[in-house]
Amino acid sequence: MIGKSYFLLSLLQVGLSQEWKGDAPREVTAQEGVCVQIPCHYTYPSHLANQPRVGIWFNNKKQSSSSIAFHSEDHNQEAPQFRHRTRLSGDLKDGDCSLIINSVTRGDAGPYYFRIEFDGRNRYNYHPVTQLQVSVGLSQEWKRNTPRKVTAQEGSCVQIPCHYSYPSHLEKQTRDGVWFYAEKQIPWAPLAFHSKDHNHELQQFRHRTRLSGDLKDGDCSLIINNVTRGDAGPYFFRIEFDTGPSHNYYPVTRLRVSDFTDKPTIFPAEIIAGKRVNISCTFNTTCNGTAPVLTWDTPTDVPGSVSNTVTQHGVTLTYTSVLTLIPSLKHHGHNLTCRVRSPSVSLERTLILTVQYAPQNLSMTFPDTINPLSINLIEGSSTVIICSVESFPASNLMWRHLNVPINSTRSNNELWLVIPHVTSWHTGDYQCVAENEHGAVEGSITITVEHQNFNQWITGLLGAGITLCVGLIGFIIYKCVRKGSCTGRGHSAQAEQKRGDGKQETKLNSRIDECRGPFYENCEVTGALRNQKKKDVEMKPTHRVNSYQVDDVYANCDTDKNSIYANK
């Protein structure tokens, strides 16, 4: 039918537009007594794609309740002259707003425009209007309206839109419709469809082809189920009247067969651990042929039930499978697959389960310790306590001290409590609270702050004092020894000698008065040996000792073997 080919080509644009746009012809001509289609396609803002909607056609330039030609929700609102004669050829969800009027009358002539209603704020009238012209009597010409090319997916069904007209004097004649699988009619040309005798059909098409409408309404659209690669090629339609002429409608329509790419659609639902949920999978087709089969692949330990339904909106069939299950936390991240099967192909779509659950397994970690009930801290030290939790979605965490919030974070399953300098103020109970939309959990820990040990301080101080005293005494001793060695060799000696027949006592007092310099350079010996007859020691008072001779500072002194300075 007129407009179906346009609908198929523009289907993918639905819902993607951010604007209200309508596409309908400015003028359509119909013949009185037959049906007519006003092709229509519309777009709308994408955020309304999943919203329910109502489609309305008005037979007037201005909006009026008395001029409603079609109402998708309440047919009682339609004007009496249109009631039971109007319908949509497609599905509003697919962006198809094409209007079909059966048994057209001259009173149907006039302006038509389409209106879509989503809710109280999102409504739109699509202009300009389409002017319907109604001619008296049927066309005197053989005409057809079919696309030049149609693409089908292997394993699915396909529709080749077709609308035809013929001379008006053949209106009452019975007729047969024939679809040829060829470039033109030749003897023994293969038939894809024959409305009267299916035995004339080529074996590969038998039981797979049919017409989507009624030949009396001028609808010659062909449906092919379970399309194969061998179905690709040229097709044309032929009408045969019982007592009248026949006519071939050219040019041909060329069918192209591609890989099967249509996948089912899974509508995700909010999945909460322990709660029953319904997950829907749908598959749409415009062909009422071999029904596709929807199946589910679920985790092996997930009990569930499945229900299947089929609904029709215009020419669109929607196959729906609803899976009911009760997920648990362990199913988070598992795959859930919906598969559509046809006699020869199958495709699937997979949903990764995101199971939502309340916070759980809250833990507080202190260095090397998990979930301590209390901890002891030394005043002046620093510490970090980490609070973590498991949840989906992520929780809002908060630290409290004595029930007063001191730290928080949003949508994060971990929160650090950092104390850079511990004081007595930090003593007390601390709570970590985790909360998301499904619940909350709380943990607590007690911190005790200890002052530095006074006895340890005293012991340390005494130790330092003793060390200081020992060092001072050692220093004094060192200074004294140093002073004595630098003053020189001072000593007194008494010597007694016995010679011959008597005793003599000789007292020797000697003093070295002065010694300066490391090598005793200016060493003078004063004094004399008292009461001693013999000179024992003779020193040169002004003799300079070699300053580089370190080993023996007395090397240049003349000594007597009986001298007290002699080396023994």
Image (cartoon, rainbow, N blue to C red):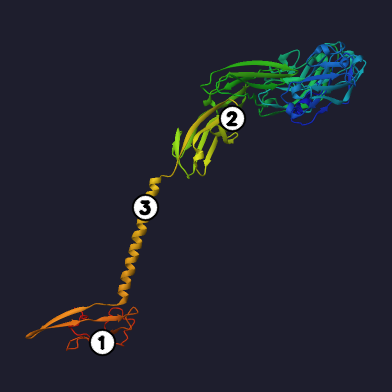
Q: In this view, does 482 lie above or below 208?
A: below
Q: In this view, does 491 lie to the left or right of 133?
A: left
Count of numbered labels shown in the rendering = 3
| Residue matched to label 3 | 462
User: How much space separates mark 1 and mark 3, taking CA atoms?
Assistant: 56 Å
Please state, as top left, top right, bottom left or bottom right, where the C terminus lies in the image: bottom left
Q: In this view, does 201 lie to the left or right of 553?
A: right
Q: How crowded is mark 1: few (under 14 residues within 10 Å), some or many (20 or more)?
A: some
Closer-to-camera residue (261/519): 519
Tag 3: residue type?
Leu
Mark pair 3, 2: CA separation: 61 Å
Whether 513 is drawn above or below 286: the answer is below
* Badge number at residue 393: 2
Mark 3 or 2, nearer chain start: 2
Q: Which of marks 1 and 3 is nearer the N terminus?
A: 3
CA distance for labels 2 and 1: 107 Å
> Residue 539: which disc?
1
Tell me if mark 3 has few (under 14), some (14-19) or many (20+) residues whose alpha carbon lies within 10 angstroms of its own: few
Residue drawn at (70%, 16%) of the image: 311
Q: Do the residues labelled 1 and 3 touch (CB within 8 Å)?
A: no
Give the amino acid type for the residue marked by disc 1 in the picture: Met
Left or right: 148 as drawn, with respect to 472: right
Question: Going by the image, does 158 lie left or right of 217?
Answer: left
Residue 427 coordinates in the image, percent (x, y): 49, 37
Which-is-in-front pick, marks 3 and 2? 3
Where residue 527 appears, x then y in whole percent? 25, 85
Dot in front, 2 or 1: 1
Q: Whole-percent x and y of residue 84?
A: 82, 11
Q: Can residue 12 be seen in this view?
A: no
Residue at the far right: name it. Answer: 136
Earlier sequence position, callout 2 versus callout 1: 2
